[in-house]
Amino acid sequence: MDLTSSRLRRRALIAIGLAALAAAAPAVTPPALAPDFTLRALSGPNLRLAEQRGQVVMVNFWATWCGPCRQEMPHLNRLYEKYRGSGFTLLGINVDDDTYKAADLAAKLAVKFPVLFDTDKRVSRVYDLSAMPASVLIDRDGRVRYRHRGYRSGFEDTYEQQIRELLKE
């Protein structure tokens, strides 16, 4: 089996695994309270979602093998930089098994927001991850207000509109 076939097989198995996780987990739908989690951060101490209460939080699930995730990262960086002084934070949760690959890609893409690691897929399962990338917007009271699955050019405009709306509340 050549390297390309091996990579494609691994990606297919991961996609199947994520779909199985999503089927087994109850969906977190708006306006449900966002399930709390604590994850190891790329830099700094472990980060707990409940400690972000009072902020508008975007939780973005991504992987190194996900092309749309790579496309989306510069837009997420821009949103984070633009609104973090206004009560907004963005948590990038990587779902790869290899945290070194994730750290390397985050450095290459100059990711500014906190990168967290969900190597055991526990948080991904709770948040019903069935597409990559996937994002959840959480209001200042800790309630899930918006869910996004996948990424296409232009989604960042919707993200920005929703962030602005939640910041005004």
Image (spheres, rainbow, N blue to C red):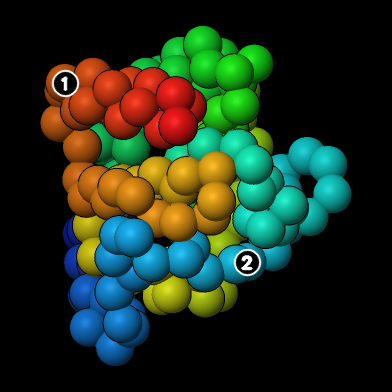
Q: Position of residue 93 (x, y in %)?
A: 52, 50
Q: Residue at x 61, y 26 (%)?
A: 87
Q: Position of residue 17 (x, y in %)?
A: 30, 77
Q: Residues within 10 Å of mark 2 (few under 14, many from 20)?
A: few
Q: Nearer the viewer, residue 164 or 133?
A: 164
Q: Nearer the viewer, residue 107 or 129?
A: 129
Q: Residue at x 78, y 55 (%)?
A: 46
Q: Residue at x 33, y 83 (%)?
A: 25
Above or below: residue 60 compared with residue 15: above
Above or below: residue 164 compared with residue 51: above
Residue type pointed to by label 2: Phe
* Residue 80 circle label: none
Q: Position of residue 49 (x, y in %)?
A: 64, 55
* Horizontal relation, residue 115 to residue 130: left or right: right
Q: Earlier in the sequence, mark 1 or mark 2?
A: 2
Residue type pointed to by label 1: Gly
Q: Residue furthest right?
A: 45
Q: Is residue 37 visible?
A: yes
Q: Which residue is mark 1?
A: 154
Of helix, strand and loop, which one carries label 2? loop
Q: Position of residue 16 (x, y in %)?
A: 22, 75
Q: Locate the C terminus and report the quarter of the image it occupies.
A: top left
Q: Residue furthest front?
A: 169
Q: Which residue is mark 2?
A: 37
Q: Residue furthest bottom?
A: 24
- Real-space Cα distance between discs 1 and 2? 30 Å
* Horizontal relation, residue 8 to residue 111: left or right: left
